[in-house]
Image: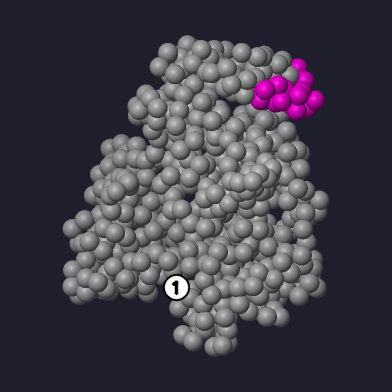
Amino acid sequence: MNTQSKTGGVAAQRLAQARALMSREGIDAWLVPSADPHLSEYLPGYWQGRQWLSGFHGSVGTLIITADFAGVWADSRYWEQASKELAGSGIELVKLLSGQPGPLEWLAEQARADSVVAVDGAVLAVASSRTLAGKLYERGARLRTDFDPLTELWGDRPALPAQAIYEHLAPHATQSRAEKLARLRGVLAERGADWHFIATLDDIAWLFNLRGEDVSYNPVFISFALIGPDTVSLFVASEKVNPALRKALQSQGITLREYTSIGAALRDVPRDARLLVDPARVTCGLLDYLDSEVTLVEGLNPTTLFKAQKSAADAQHIRQVMEQDGAALCEFFAWLDTALGTEIVSELTIDEKLSAARARRPGYISQSFATIAGFNGNGAMPHYRATETEHAQIEGDGLLLIDSGGQYLGGTTDITRMVPIGSPTAEQKRDCTRVLKGVIALSRASFPRGIPSPLLDGIARAPIWAEGVNYGHGTGHGVGYFLNVHEGPQVIAYQAPVTPQTAMQAGMITSIEPGTYRPGKWGVRIENLVLNQEAGKTEFGEFLKFETLTLCPIDTGCLEVSLLTKEERKWLNDYHAHVKQRLSPLLEGAALAWLETQTAAV
């Protein structure tokens, strides 16, 4: 029996156990989101119930189980992976497609009078619970949010993470905790709130200038924060805070309370309180602790917008990090050039060597996400990850896609580059060139301050759409400051809702990463990070433009340069001249020689 069929068999057994428990409890449908009480992207093992039940390891997906159906809803990034991992499990892959029902819509459509849909409310956003409960009510069904059968089914469930937390110190922390808290209280007053509850880990880490290791790739820690009129409480397991840090926090008026005491603290919020919460960033199970007379003031967490708009001091640290990261990439690519054809190189080797090159750079802490090194067909899976049991060797002809990033004390990086292996075909070169045209088009754009970020997506896609090609993922995501590599509120994706909080403002850092994917053949993605900069004011208003932060050559061996316009070639040559000027002082030997070759004008 192969590994996949074994995995499918285990999932099938767990599915049968889940259905037996559902029958006992009178549950008609069980919703299992990829979520924790903090609505994180990357989940500690304790909350990876969807993965444990289904065997699908993608970071995003929603499982629904009924008496006669089980399915995982996943977007196009995960279709190939999910098809493989769900094989033999009795669980179907349901492809998320524009215009087709998502998991919540599907549940509502399937619901019958008196049926019960259950979910663990501790991991379902308030906004989602309201939407689902309303749709079910219309059909005479109801939503039950006190159902967590994983506590019974998952016998070897991992413990909660217990890594120590530490301070993010000056000069990299460019504002003090006191300054950030004062700024937060100012916004609370403007919104007519006297209390504020935060459950999202990146907001908490930013606000308190603290970092941790509880979540893979994101330097955050499991916690809650509750700010009152004259109190600030941080809920975190006591063993994770050393005496010196505890003393420092307490001296600044921050009360440390046990992570597990958050329910009691929310019950104690005064009945006449006006509590600011973000319904998209807090779970219904947590708010159920509140007295019913507490007034909810709903809106975006103020810290979300604060940390999205990097200060000038933050931006300078990030530029320095980009130089170090770019130098590490040059060292890696110089090694790869010499290694190919002379030693065995696999997708796993790529990850190992690239991580080692970054680790030699000052201020490096960790990867910012799992490296994606996909050769030919593997590159067609946008979130592919090589494993010991399944990976490709880099040999022959084709395209190697490398998407990687690092966490540094002074910033977070995320970059994708294409590497020509042997002799890429004319079609592969056209795909790479078309994607680069999309990168250039958006990188050169000016746009009104405050424009909803999803509306910018068409600029990058226009050169790709022009040839009847498209890609399923978004074009850009926000990036944190030594925080999560995927952060909002801005997102460049036409599929995303256009809301006031997605407005583009100066200081935001966003990725530009269009792509093209040909399943089973190859995938193309080129990615830079850009910073929103002031572009001046006219009679029509204020405008912004992008400063490209990422510093690494774009391999012209992947390109059909004749397909680039004069303006596009100028952009590429100017970018390469800038990269050479910034990185040369940090390099020597083979890495410097590689940089000089790769930045030659076309």
- Residue 233 in sight in this render: no
Packing grade of label 1 (10 A; few <14, some 14-19, many >=20) is many
Looking at the rendering, the stretch of residues picked out in magenta corresponds to 574-591
Q: Position of residue 179 (x, y in %)?
A: 76, 65
Between 201 and 370, the one lying in front of the other is 201
**Residue at 53% in and 14% down:** 561
Q: Residue furthest front?
A: 539
Three-letter amino acid code of the residue under disc 1: Gly
Q: For residue 362, which quarter of the picture?
A: top right
Q: For residue 383, which quarter of the picture?
A: top left
**For residue 488, side relative to residue 113 (left or right):** right
Main SS, magenta region, reads helix
Give the quadrant of the N terminus. Answer: top left
Between 238 and 298, the one lying in front of the other is 298
**For residue 546, side relative to residue 289 (left or right):** right
Q: Which residue is mark 1?
A: 285
Give the quadrant of the C terminus. Answer: top right
**Residue at 38% in and 68% down:** 129
Colouring method of the image: one colour
Answer above or below: position of 52 versus 275.
above
Q: Position of residue 425 (x, y in %)?
A: 42, 13
Q: Position of residue 498 (x, y in %)?
A: 46, 53
Between 602 and 234, the one lying in front of the other is 602
**For residue 303, side relative to residue 141 (left or right):** right
**Residue at 77% in and 67% down:** 178
Mark 1 lies on a secondary structure that is: helix
